[in-house]
Image (cartoon, grey):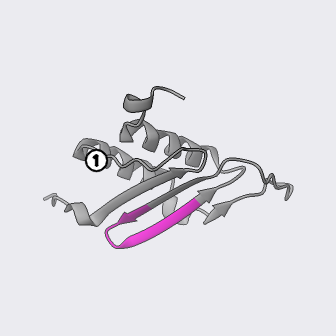
Amino acid sequence: MAQKKSDADILITIKREACFGEQRHRISEDRVNKLIKAFERVKYFSSKDKYEVDENGMRVMDQPRTTTSTSLNGKQKRVVDCYCAPKELVELEDLIDKLAGPYEYIGPL
């Protein structure tokens, strides 16, 4: 039997440092469930804490930074994407943006 999770059990954030201010959005339970599945699919809790160098050890300092975080059932994780994050993480970042709905207010980037 499935249990309904309370709002306090789940927190998902994304911060794109090229943005011009903080926006908060509440999303439907269906969208939250899609995001939870996406976090599980990319094995988010096994990701590195920070992606900042490529496979050759090269670093680019003037890249925009994206920070995601989640708190699911007592487990917490924060990942900073500066440079050369895995494709799956970048797709997760884009999905968070899509499902959170900011483009409804500002239009596509």
Residue that badge 1 annotates = 26
Q: Is residue 5 above or below residue 18?
A: below
Residue at figure coordinates x 23%, y 47% from the top left? 29
> For the point 37% across and 39% down, which residue is it?
99
| Residue furthest left in the image | 1
- Against 20, is 3 above or below? below
**Was residue 74 drawn as part of the magenta stretch in this picture?**
yes
Look at label 1 and name its amino acid. Answer: Arg
Q: Secondary structure at mark 1?
A: loop
> What residue range appears in magenta?
70-79
Q: Tell me what residue is drawn at x 31 percent, y 61 percent.
A: 10
- Residue visible at 48% across and 67% down? 77
Where residue 100 appears, x then y in whole percent? 37, 42
Compare residues 6 and 67 and report the one nearer the observer: 67
- Indicate the position of residue 5 as horizontal and vertical percent values: 20, 61
Q: Is residue 105 above or below residue 37?
A: above
Q: Is residue 107 left or right of residue 57?
A: left
Taken as a whole, is the magenta stretch helix, strand or loop?
strand
Relative placement, left or right, of 96 versus 56 is left
107 with respect to 90 (left or right): left
